[in-house]
Image (cartoon, rainbow, N blue to C red):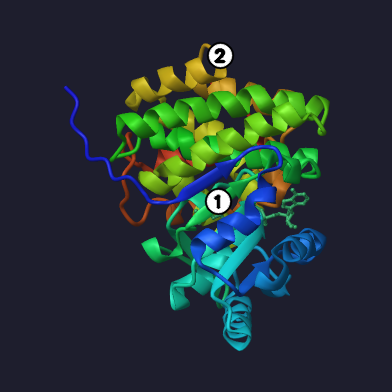
C-alpha cells in the first residue's frame, strides 16, 4: 500500500533552444537591477556574453569559480557582490559555478538565476557545499535554491564528449538513488525514470555527434529531471561512497559517480526490486547494474577507480569511512560488503 510525503520545491524553469534570449525578461521578473555574473575561468567568454545580454542590469563578472567551492573563493565572491551592490547572482556553468552562487546566497539571501551547462543538477537542489581546510561540508538550505533556471541546450554544444558522458552518469546516479530513497514518492519516481530514459537515449547520440542539438536537448532535459530528484529526496550508499572518495582523495566528481554507480546498484539490487525494474525499463536493459555498466563501456566512460586516481592501499580506509556513521540505504551497510564493492569498482569489473 502506498504511503508517502511529497514537498514541492519552488522554482521557475525556462527550457529550450534559444532560452537564453529570455534572460532580460527573467532578470526583470526577479526584480534585479544589478546582477553579478559568475563562471569558471574556462567559461569567462560565456559569462561575458551573459553580461552583454544583461546590459545595464549587469554589475560585474566574477570568473573565478573552481571545483568544490573553497571558502576563500566564496569569501572573495561575497565581497565582490557587496562591493558592487549586487542584488542577484547569475551563475553560468556546471555544479562548481552554481555552487559558488549558492555560497553567496547562503549568507546574503541574494536570488540566484542559474544557467546550467553540464548535467550535474545542482541548480535544482537546496544543497550547498563549502570546502575549508581540505574538508568539504555540505548542508541544505532553501535560501540557496536558484529562483530561476534557464536551460538552453545550445550552451552545452561545447561540453567535451568525455565530460558529457560522465556528467550524464552523475545525473543518472541522482535519479537511480531517488528511486529507492527512504522518502521516495510517486512524482519523483516518474521524474527519475524519465530522466534516466532521456539520458540513456541522448548520450549515445552525443558520443556519435557532439553537435547533435536534439540529443543535447534530450540530455539537458534528463539532467533537469534527475537534478529535481536529487533536490527533493534523500540519497543513499552511492552518494555516500562518492562523497567519501571525492572528499578524502580528491577524485574527480563526475568520473567517480560514473565508476561507482553500477557497483552501488549491484549492492542494492535485491533490496530494491521496484527501483531496479524502473531502471531496467528506462535503460532498456534486462538488469539494472549490468545495464549501466554496459552503457558506460559502450560510451567510452571510465570504468575503474584505479584509472581515476584511487590507490589500492586506500580501499580499506575508504570502506571504513563509508561505514562508520549510520545513514539510510535499502540494504543494510556491512563493512565486508562495501569493501568488496570498492574492490570491484577499483578494478572496473562488470557486476556479477
Ligand atoms: P564543473 O562545474 O566543475 O565543470 C567542469 C569543467 O567543465 C569546468 O572547467 C567548467 O567550466 C567546464 N564546463 C562546464 N560546462 C561547459 C560547457 N558547456 N562547455 C565547455 N566547458 C564546460 O563540473 P560539474 O560536474 O558540473 O560540477 C561538479 C561540482 O558540482 C562538484 O563540486 C559537486 O560536488 C557539485 N555538485 C553539487 C550538487 C548540489 O546539489 N549541490 C549537485 C551536483 C554537483
The residue lying toward the viewer, choosing from 34 and 314, is 34
The residue carrying pointer 1 sits among few (fewer than 14), some (14 to 19) or many (20 or more) residues within 10 Å by Cα, namely: many
Residue 221 appears in the picture as rendered? yes
Q: Nearer the viewer, residue 208 or 215?
A: 215
In this view, the residue in front, 200 or 287, is 200
Please give the name of the residue rendered at 44% of the width and 45% of the height, measured from the top-left corner: 230
> What residue would you read off at disc 2?
284
**Which of the pair 335/55 is nearer the observer?**
55
Tell me which residue sits at (38%, 29%) in the image: 189
| Cα separation between marks 2 and 1 | 30 Å
Asked where in the image residue 154 lies, by quadrant, the reply is: top right
Which of disc 1 and disc 2 is earlier in sequence?
A: 1
Above-or-below relation of 156 to 131: above
In the picture, the disc for residue 149 is 1
Name the residue: 67% across, 40% down. 166
Q: Closer to the observer: label 2 or label 1?
A: 1
Residue located farthest toward the bottom when viewing the structure as drawn: 83
Numbered circles on residues, count: 2
Task: For the N terminus, give its image quadrant.
Answer: top left
**Which quarter of the picture shows residue 251?**
bottom right
- Locate residue 150, reporting x and y percent: 60, 49
Q: Residue furthest top?
A: 286
Horizontal arrangement in the rendering, residue 214 relative to residue 332 (left or right): right
Residue 268 image point, x, y percent: 40, 30
Amino acid at each position: 500500500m502506498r504511503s508517502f510525503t511529497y514537498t514541492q520545491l519552488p522554482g521557475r524553469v525556462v527550457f529550450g533552444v534559444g532560452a537564453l534570449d529570455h534572460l532580460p525578461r527573467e532578470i526583470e521578473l526577479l526584480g534585479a537591477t544589478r546582477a553579478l555574473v559568475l563562471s569558471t575561468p574556462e567559461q569567462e567568454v560565456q559569462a561575458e556574453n551573459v553580461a552583454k545580454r544583461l546590459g545595464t542590469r549587469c554589475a560585474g563578472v566574477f570568473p573565478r569559480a573552481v571545483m568544490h567551492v573553497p571558502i576563500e573563493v566564496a569569501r572573495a565572491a561575497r565581497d565582490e557582490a557587496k562591493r558592487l551592490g549586487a542584488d542577484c547572482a547569475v551563475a553560468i556553468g556546471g555544479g562548481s559555478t552554481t555552487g559558488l552562487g549558492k555560497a553567496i546566497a547562503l549568507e546574503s539571501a541574494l536570488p540566484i538565476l542559474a544557467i546550467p551547462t553540464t548535467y550535474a543538477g545542482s541548480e535544482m537542489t537546496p544543497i550547498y557545499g563549502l570546502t575549508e581546510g581540505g574538508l568539504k561540508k555540505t548542508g541544505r538550505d532553501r535560501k540557496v535554491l536558484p529562483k530561476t533556471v534557464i536551460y538552453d541546450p545550445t550552451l552545452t554544444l561545447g561540453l567535451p564528449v568525455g565530460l558529457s558522458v560522465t556528467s550524464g552518469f552523475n545525473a543518472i546516479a541522482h535519479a537511480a538513488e531517488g528511486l529507492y530513497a527512504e522518502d521516495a514518492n510517486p512524482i519523483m519516481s516518474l521524474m527519475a525514470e524519465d530522466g534516466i530514459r532521456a539520458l540513456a537515449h541522448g548520450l549515445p547520440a552525443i558520443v556519435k555527434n557532439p553537435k547533435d542539438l536534439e540529443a543535447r536537448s534530450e540530455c539537458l532535459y534528463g539532467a533537469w529531471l534527475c537534478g529535481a530528484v536529487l533536490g527533493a529526496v534523500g540519497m543513499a550508499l552511492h552518494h555516500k561512497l562518492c562523497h567519501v572518495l571525492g572528499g578524502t582523495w580528491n577524485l574527480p566528481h563526475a568520473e567517480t559517480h560514473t565508476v561507482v554507480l553500477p557497483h552501488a546498484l549491484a549492492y542494492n539490487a535485491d533490496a530494491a526490486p521496484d527501483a531496479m525494474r524502473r531502471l531496467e525499463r528506462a535503460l532498456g536493459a534486462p538488469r539494472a547494474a549490468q545495464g549501466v555498466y554496459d552503457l558506460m563501456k559502450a560510451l567510452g566512460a571510465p570504468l575503474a577507480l584505479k584509472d581515476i586516481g584511487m590507490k589500492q592501499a586506500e580501499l580499506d580506509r575508504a570502506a571504513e569511512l563509508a561505514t562508520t556513521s549510520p545513514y539510510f540505504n535499502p540494504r543494510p551497510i556491512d563493512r565486508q560488503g562495501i569493501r568488496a564493492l570498492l574492490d570491484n569498482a577499483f578494478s572496473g569489473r562488470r557486476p556479477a
